[in-house]
Image: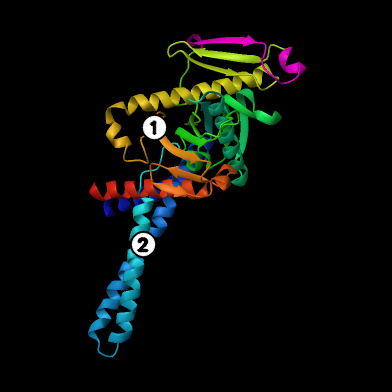
Amino acid sequence: MFDRLNEVQARADEINRKLSDPDVARDHRRMTELHKELSKLEPVVEVYIAWKQNKTELADARLMLDDPEMRDMAQEEVELLEEQLTQYEAQLKLLLLPKDPYEGRNVILEIRAGTGGDEAALFAGDLFRMYNYYCEQNKLKFEVFSAHEITVGGGGGRSACGYKEILCKISGEAAYTHLAFEGGTHRVQRVPLTETQGRVHTSAATVAVLPEAEEVEIDIAPNELRIDVMRAGGPGGQSVNTTDSAVRIVHIPTNITVICQDEKSQHKNKARAMSVLSARLLQRKQDEAMAEVTAARRSMVGSGDRSEKIRTYNFPQNRVTDHRINLTLYKLDRVMNGDLSELISGLQASNQAMLLAAQDEG
C-alpha cells in the first residue's frame, strides 16, 4: 500500500511542477486535465502526509516511555497516536480503492415492463415515479427522452398510468454514483388494479442504468446509421401528431434501435436518440470487454446482469427486499416515494467492503 502512496505523492508533486510551467499554462485543455487529475490525488496525499506526521510523533512519544517521570503522560500520548494512526490507515485504504470509471457521469435510465402484462406496465410507471422523486430529493435533473405510455382501467371507474418502456436522462455530478446498482430485474407482489378476487400477483420490470458516453469513447461512423424521421404517435396534443418530429436511429452493425419523440423539435429528438444510442453502445462495449472475466465482475454488488432479480417490492406487507445484500425494510410506502437512501447506502457499503477484501487479498 505504501509503495502506491509514494507513487501518488510523487505524481501529485510532478503535476504541481507542470502547472507552474508557462508552456503548460498556455494549453488550456492540458491545464484542465492536470487540475482534474490533481483534484483526485490531493485527498490521498493530504491523508498520507498526516499519517507520516502521526507516525513520527508516535515514535517520539514511545521514546519518552523510558523516562520514569514522563511515562504516564507518554503512555496516554502513545495510545492516542496509535488510535489516530489506525484511523489514517483505514482512510488510506478507502482512498486507494479503484474508482469506477464512470463515476461523475450522467446516466440514461431505461425502465421496461417485463412479465405480467398491464400490471408490469403499471409497476414500470411506479418505478419511474420512484426514481423521479429520488432525483428531486437529491437535486438531480430528471428528463424524459421517450415514453410508451398506457392507461389501465380497473373496477369502480379506477384507472392508472403505466409504461411499456420509458427512457430518461438523469444529470448531476453524482448521478451514476447514486444509481449504479439499480440495474436489474425488479419484482412486485401485489393485488393488481384489474384483479376482482383480491389475489396477489407477481410481475416484473427491468431497469438499466447506462453511463452517458463521452465523445472519445464511442466512434460512430455516419454510414453505420439509418436515421428515419416520422410523425410522433400516441397522446400529446395536435402539434405532436401533425409534425414529422419523431426520430428513429438504427445502428446497422448491431441493429440497436432508438426512437425519441417527446420533443416537438426534430433536432432535439435526434440529439437525444444519439445520446441513448451512444450509452447503449458503451454498455455493449463494456460487456464485451468483461465477458472473459465474469467472475471478477461478481466481486461487485451482484453481477449487473439485467436478468438477475435484484429486488422484491411486496405491497401487502409494505416490504422491500434487496436480494444482493439480504436487506429487508418494512417501509415500502416511503421507498416508492423516493426514500431509497437506506437501500443505496447499503449497496454502496457492501460493494466497498468487497473491494476492500479484494484489495487485502491482493
Most extreme residue toward the right is 238
Q: Quadrant of residue 73?
A: bottom left
Q: Is residue 299 left or right of residue 248?
A: left
Q: Amino acid at mark 1?
A: Glu
Residue 230 x/y as whole percent: 64, 10
Determine the CA span between mark 2 and mark 1. Answer: 38 Å
Residue under the point 30% across and 31% down = 294
Residue under the point 55% across and 28% down = 119
Residue 169 x/y as whole percent: 57, 31
Please tell me the numbered disc located at residue 88.
Answer: 2
> Which sits in the foreground, 293 or 147?
147
Q: Secondary structure at mark 1?
A: loop
Label 1, on which residue? Answer: 308
Q: Quadrant of residue 183?
A: top left
Is residue 302 positioned above or below 42 on the image? above
Is residue 32 positioned above or below 62 on the image? above
Q: Which residues are magenta?
A: 222-242
